[in-house]
Image (spheres, helix red, strand yellow):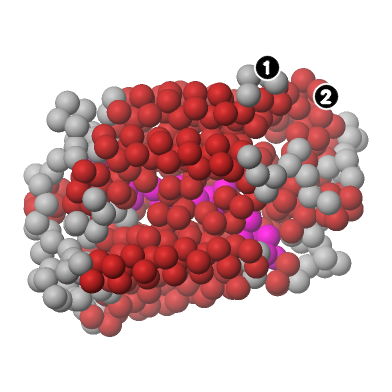
Amino acid sequence: MRAQQNIEQFGYRQELHRGVGLADLIFYGLAYMVPIAPFAIFGNVYSESGGMPVLAYLVGMIALLFTAASYAQMVKAFPLSGSVYNYAGRGIAPPVGFLTGWMVLLDYILVPCLLYLVASIAMNASVPAVPVWAWLVGFAAVNTAINLRGIKMTVRLTRILIAVELAVLALFLLVGVWALLRGEGHGFSFSPLFNADTFTWPVMFAAVSVAVLSFLGFDGISMLVEESTGGSAQVGRAMRVALLLAGVLFITQVWVAALLVPDPAGLIEHPSDTAFYDAAAVAGGEWLRHVTTAATALSWGLVNTMVAQVSVSRLLYAMARDRQLPSFLAKVSVRHSVPSNAILLICLLSIGVGLWSAARDDGVALLSSLINMGAMVAFIVLHASVIVHHALRSGSDRLWAHLVSPLIGAGILVFVVINADIMAQLLGLVWLGLGVLALITLYALGRRPTLRSMPAGSDRR
């Protein structure tokens, strides 16, 4: 089998089950991104963008399409689980791969924590008799049980839950457009796309740094390359399709919501976590507010966290089998062909960090900042790995794919990072510093990062 030979040429055995097709990958990516993700962060994006959330999501989608193109190039060169950890390690050098994997861990490990927390707070608001901690533990237990049963069950359930999310989104759009036609809201305009009175590039990139939270997860598709029936080509195609579909859905829903915001000037000055639900109430009344609120809670607490747990467990598995994390994380369930110990560890971490964050007033904002910064830095290194591996090391003459495109993608993301929240920048640097200390510790213990099929003591492929 061609895919299996690709794994073996890097010194690994095919342990994970190959049963995930193109449609499965696309649904997985959509589930990770959540088609209704803007429901939860619309108020912050609207405020940060000066009332131009559509432009923020459009710029974010374009930036990440360049990132998806770089992923496609690297997953083709290195069709292995571990995503950007493997691409940077093999494309540039193993120590760079370790630090990049460390940064993306900040994203992948904390995403389930954030999702459980947001969903639990929302469910507690609807059912106050059940405390936040109980909802959080319940969501984590259900998702872990499903993921331990195998990737096919996860994919099957995500298809069903995605259909429910799309139905709720379609309902909001139909009711919202009908309300606009009846004269509700502010009428149709292009101001959510561009407003000369509030537009500046720093404002826009600051908004993009928040909006990209909705897109994070498309990159998780690359984690399933060792379980994909079509290998790296199928994974690259699925990433692009999922990102485009999500971008169209995000842009459409925030455009309609922006036209229905009760107090645009007030929302710009004072962002609100309930802004989208307030817009839904303008369109259809309190029943639509409750429908969109419940859909957000269930999609973040079940659908998104289910697939997030899959991705981070594969990253831990990939780093552990290279002896860069404890070896017990590389254990694969014989019966279900999943990294069971990694899945269980993520469950425990999600509960622990989630409960700690729930006790803080700024828990959601703190986790969001950390997640975005980890992902953006990792994506920038991904673009660099394309240039180093293909353009510099291999002498590729494909200038657009291996030089121009990754340069543009990295440049956009650098501007996003520069204009991100100061706290996010600071926490990102702290996490990177901890990664450097961990790397120094590995060297001190005589376990300098190496990757199979790469000679020990060599930092090149």
Instruction: Locate residue 122, reporting x and y percent.
Output: 66, 30
Compared to 299, does 415 lie above or below?
A: below
- Per the model, the C-alpha gap separating discs 2 and 1 is 25 Å
Q: Is residue 355 left or right of residue 32?
A: right
Quadrant in the picture for the N terminus: top left
The residue shown at (17%, 26%) is 335
Q: Quadrant of the C terminus?
A: bottom left
- Identify the residue shown where x is 77% and y is 20%: 287
Residue 210 colored in magenta in the image: yes
State which quadrant residue 209 falls in: bottom right
Vertical order, 233 against 133 (above or below): below
Residue displayed at 81% across by 23% down: 286
List the residue tagged with mark 1: 129
Query: Secondary structure under badge 2?
Result: loop
What span is in magenta? 204-228
Residue 452 within the magenta-colored segment of the rendering? no
Please, is residue 17 above or below residue 53 in the view? above
Q: Secondary structure at mark 1?
A: loop
Give the main secondary structure, helix, strand or loop, of the magenta stretch.
helix
Residue 285: give its label: 2
Q: Residue at x 74, y 59 (%)?
A: 49
183 or 451, nearer to the observer: 451
